[in-house]
Image (tube, rainbow, N blue to C red):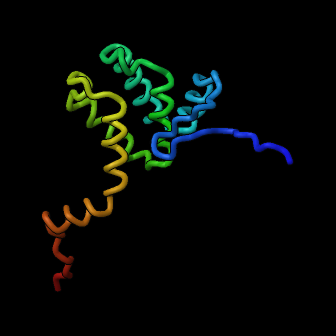
């Protein structure tokens, strides 16, 4: 009987792979190049800002896991989350990529519930009636 070979040891929550090869920069570029131009510019701005402001998160592996965790999330939500993170100055308060990932994933998970609650709170526009 042949022993089983292990191809990867991945955490289902954060995407950490214990057997990740060393070509992590190539993987980051592949993941980023599949996204829209707007999101690519935001990722570039985010990585530059993090390198300058948060040296503890200045790690390619951390950025890879950030991208991996948000791979299946809608791009509009990712753009919204990054913009909110940068506009509110959360990076200057010491909140890193894990906090940003939480913002985006929570918005993605609770999107339907939030829209229902907003419609209930704000109401809906009245029906259009034709004037005769």
Residue visible at 34% across and 13% down in the picture: 52
Please state if 128 lies on the left or on the right of 2 as rendered: left
Residue shown at the point (19%, 61%) measured from the top left: 118
Can you say which quadrant of the picture contains the C terminus? bottom left
The picture places residue 108, in percent across and down from the top left corner, at 36, 52
Query: Residue 129, how many percent across, how many down?
Result: 19, 81
The part of the image, by quadrant, that contains residue 116 is bottom left
Residue in the picture at 38% in, 26% down:
46
Residue plotted at (31% across, 35% down): 99
Q: Is residue 80 shown to the viewer in this render?
A: no
| Residue 129 falls left or right of residue 41 | left
Compare residues 104 and 75 and report the one nearer the observer: 104
- Please name whichever residue, 71 or 42, is drawn nearer the observer in this view of the structure: 71
Q: Position of residue 76 (x, y in %)?
A: 39, 46
User: Residue 80: which quarter of the image?
Assistant: top left
Is residue 50 rendered to the left or right of residue 93?
Answer: right
Q: Residue furthest right?
A: 1
The residue most toward the bottom is 132
Nearer-the-camera pick, 123 or 101: 101
**Residue 112 vertical placement versus 132 (above, below):** above
């Amino acid at each position: 009987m042949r022993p089983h070979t292990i191809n990867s040891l991945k955490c289902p929550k954060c995407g950490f792979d214990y057997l990740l090869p060393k070509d992590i920069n190539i993987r980051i570029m592949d993941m980023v190049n599949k996204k829209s131009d707007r999101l690519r510019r935001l990722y570039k701005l985010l990585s530059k800002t993090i390198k300058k402001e948060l040296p503890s998160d200045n790690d390619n592996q951390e950025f890879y896991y950030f991208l991996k965790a948000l791979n299946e999330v809608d791009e509009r939500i990712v753009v919204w989350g990054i913009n909110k993170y940068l506009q509110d100055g959360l990076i200057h308060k010491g909140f890193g990529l894990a906090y940003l990932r939480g913002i985006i994933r929570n918005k993605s998970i609770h999107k339907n519930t939030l829209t229902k609650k907003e419609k209930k709170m704000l109401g809906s526009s009245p029906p259009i009636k034709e004037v005769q």
